[in-house]
Image (tube, rainbow, N blue to C red):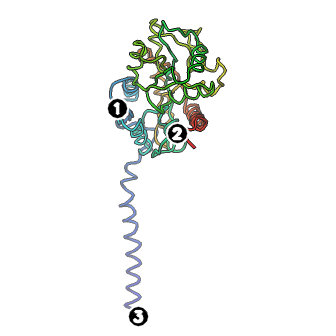
Amino acid sequence: MKRSTRGKIINIKYFYFVVPLFVIFILAPFCLSAEDPAKYPSKPITLIVPVAPGGMFDSVCRKLADLAGSMMGQAIVVVNKPGGGQIIGTAAIAAAAPDGYTIGVATFAPLAVTPHTRAVPYKTKDDFTYIMSYGKMTMFFCVHSESRWKTFKEFVEEARRSPNKLTYSTVGTMGAQHIFMEYIFSKEKVKVTHVPYDAAEIVTNLMGGHVDSGFAVLLPWVQGGKLRALAIQEEKRVEAIPDVPIFSDLGYGDEVKAPLWIGFCGPKGLDSRILNKLNDVFKKCSEDPTFKELCVKWSIVPSYKDPESFRTIIHKDYDVQRNMLKELGFIK
């Protein structure tokens, strides 16, 4: 009995000695890796860009990354993760640790459109912390400058007389631009044949007369007199061409005002102090003259939105795109 009791006492002492050591051993790496958000950043930050190097998104993001890195005293390293219609890169942002050291680019298609048309490994409304938007892409519905159509109404009326005879081009089937124009044509109850091209091919084929119209970022060619804009997807008329109506001016409703935004996001759970610092720094960088010059080159309209405003816009556009797709019969 004495031996048994003594053994129990030893076992209890062993338990109270070993278990705390075990807990400390397990938790130590996490405790040591935790960082005071007030000292953020203390090491380089990864910025995921969900498209291939080169082109509009990549160039503009690299410029902001350079400016912000200099301001914060830590490099912001751009990592391109293209593929899957930007789903691969966007999913990588959602899956990252919420420590502020992996953030990425938030764009319209993978967040507002694609989740309604195919399975994606993230939830737009739940899996991200939205940092800020820095710009928007204004879409122009254009025809050749010497075409017979002077207004969008004239184009629609001819389409009504000749179903599926006229053509229009966007950068891809089931992309945001394609869905938008199908929605507009559905409101008019007309049939216009969609011809997908990449951005450069749209201009080439419009100029060559291979398609009747195109819907894309086409302001430089409008200003250069090569193309004629008949309508614009924007919240208000464009100062450079004030006589061209936006689609809501033509009676299609406020839901067609939304331009294609571009911004930054991180995974859900980002500490508010880190979020505020990233927002403040990127906001200041988006006001830099060299950044604004680059926006002009790529036909991006600088448009800052704070975290809450950006989140609200994304959630709204997510719902608007779902409703459009349902109305068009693209999803159930």
Residue at the spot of label 2: 272
Q: CA distance from mark 1 to mark 2?
A: 23 Å
Q: In the rendered image, which quarter contains the N terminus?
A: bottom left
Residue at the spot of label 3: 1
Outermost bottom residue: 1
Q: Secondary structure at mark 3?
A: loop
Please rate how many residues cluster around mark 3, counting C-alpha atoms within 10 Å: few if below 14, some from 14 to 19, many from 20: few
Amino acid type assigned to the residue bearing label 1 in the image: Val
122 vs 119, nearest the viewer? 119
Q: Is residue 278 visible?
A: no
In the picture shown, does residue 130 fall above or below 202? below
Q: Position of residue 160 (x, y in %)?
A: 60, 21
Residue at the spot of label 1: 78
Q: Position of residue 224 (x, y in %)?
A: 44, 6
- The residue depicted at 51 percent of the width and 21 percent of the height is 165
Amino acid type assigned to the residue bearing label 3 in the image: Met
Please rate how many residues cluster around mark 2, counting C-alpha atoms within 10 Å: few if below 14, some from 14 to 19, many from 20: few
7 vs 121, nearest the viewer? 121
Q: Secondary structure at mark 2?
A: helix
Query: With 254 as the anchor, is 2 left or right in this view?
Result: left
Between marks 3 and 1 in the image, the one whose residue lies nearer the viewer: 1
- Mark sitting earlier along the chain (1/2): 1
Q: CA distance from mark 2 to mark 3?
A: 60 Å
- Mark sitting earlier along the chain (2/3): 3
Q: Secondary structure at mark 1?
A: strand
Q: Position of residue 211 (x, y in %)?
A: 44, 18
